[in-house]
Amino acid sequence: MENLLARVTLNPAVSQGKPTLRNMRFTVAQLLELLAAGMTNQEILADYPYLEEADIHAALLYAAHIANARTIIALPLAS
């Protein structure tokens, strides 16, 4: 699993330091939004051929780690 997490990179010079996949300008959040919108892994890989199946798994694992964090900051709800 740690090998998967190595695909998630944090670089202040790329995408304003947001978590990206393999230091590319494709953020973990972008990938999660595509999945949440209902795209399948196959559709994502067809639309973004530079991504790999392992990138999708890495983004999901990263999100799981964030969700399991001890401290979660509550965001205000939009009105």
Image (cartoon, helix red, strand yellow):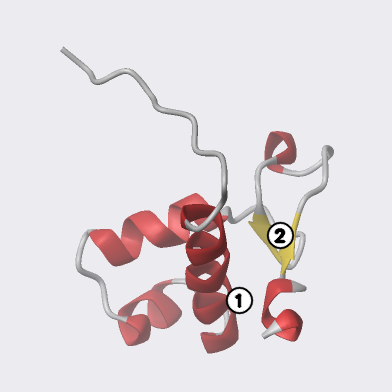
Whether the residues at callouts 2 and 1 have beta carbons within 8 Å, the answer is yes
Task: Please indicate, yes or no, whether residue 32 appears anywhere in the rendered image.
Answer: yes
Q: Residue furthest top?
A: 79
Q: Nearer the viewer, residue 44 or 57?
A: 57
Amino acid type for the residue under numbered disc 2 = Met
Q: Which secondary structure, mark 2? A: loop
Q: Which residue is mark 2?
A: 24
Q: Quadrant of the C terminus?
A: top left
CA neighbours of label 2 inside 10 A, class few (<14), some (14 to 19), many (20+): some
1 and 54: which is toward the camera: 1
Residue 49 visible? The answer is no
Element under label 1? loop
Q: How far is mark 2 from mark 1, CA to CA?
A: 9 Å
Dot 1 amino acid type: Tyr
* 8 up-or-down from 12: above or below: below
Which image quarter holds the N terminus? bottom right
In the current view of this chain or complex, which residue is farthest to the front? 70
Q: Where residue 49 sits: x, y (%)?
A: 53, 79
Residue 65 versus residue 52 in the image, above or below:
above
- Residue 32, placed above or below residue 46: above
Q: Is residue 54 above or below residue 19?
A: below
Q: In the rendered structure, which disc, 2 or 1, sits on the residue that comes first in sequence?
A: 2
Residue at image mark 1: 50
